[in-house]
Amino acid sequence: MCGIIALLLANEDEFVNQMLFDGLTVLQHRGQDAAGIVTSERRRLHLRKDNGLVKDVFQTRHMMELRGNVGLGHVRYPTAGSSSCAEAQPLYTNYPHGICVAHNGNLVNTPELEEMCRTKLNRHVNTDSDSELLLNIFATNLVTASDSEDMVDTVFSAVQAVMSTCKGGYAGLYLINGVGLVGFRDPHGIRPLVFGTRKSSLAAPVSAVPATPAKMNNAKGRLDYALSSESVAIDTLGFNLVRDVKAGEAIFIDMRTGDCHTRICHNEPSLAPCIFEYV
């Protein structure tokens, strides 16, 4: 069990660092082994992660470096790999775009995925973390699908490939640098993930967001977005809870337009959540 959170603010002059810190603090019960935050400041990524509690990993000097209006946060409870700080998240790969992942869950076919990454995809896997496999498989499929002119379809095609390849219970968040945030939940919805919004500081008054849209194309930069393992982080940060991410669903928040897109990325989703995630 790990805690994950993602934030995207419509105002590029605002920073998510303190909000991510506060969100991880209220998710601390989900993991005390390690903590990490990555932010993006006009395409420059800033990363801080280490073993320890949130309050110890992030000192003032670290927080000052975590600039940017979009970012991911993670608190780790080690269930796969080791307790090395090298396996603290978020994890990063530079191609394509620069992608970071924060992941909660376990993959059950890791030997096959490791072999596939090394021999078929020519991807270097440097840790024993299954999160690194999720990162590399998504990145590879994002390149493969990039022939499409529509970035929205490209992202969802990559997530669909991840879900068809990676077996297990997982919820995850990708930060695609300069493109947006992606949140996804395994086809059985074993691990939790929730979604919230609030009016941005740039916005005029806006009506409530529909609970189950296929595309929130009326946002036009007026909304801030949050994804989290638990609604407590959504509430604490002053966002309005929209709903749970569905089993087999991906949510893509396009930071270039401010729009939010959702799609079921598995042919046969079936909700079977882990009860211990809700204790």
Image (cartoon, grey):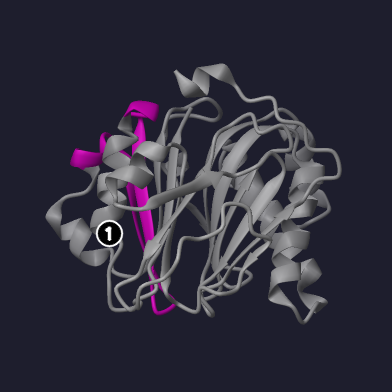
Viewer-proximal residue among 34 and 268: 268
The residue under label 1 is which amino acid type?
Asn
36 over 46 or under it: above or below: above
Hey, which quadrant is residue 216 in on the image? bottom right
Dot 1 falls on a residue whose secondary structure is helix
Write down the residue under mark 1.
Answer: 17
Does the magenta-highlighted stretch encompass residue 53?
A: yes
Viewer-proximal residue among 173 and 115: 173
| Magenta highlight range | 29-56
Viewer-proximal residue among 136 and 199: 199
130 over 92 or under it: above or below: above
| Residue 124 makes an appearance in the image | no
Does the magenta-highlighted stretch encompass residue 150?
A: no
Hey, which quadrant is residue 2 in on the image? top left
Q: Position of residue 138 (x, y in %)?
A: 69, 56
Quadrant that contains the C terminus: top left
Q: Position of residue 42 (x, y in %)?
A: 40, 79
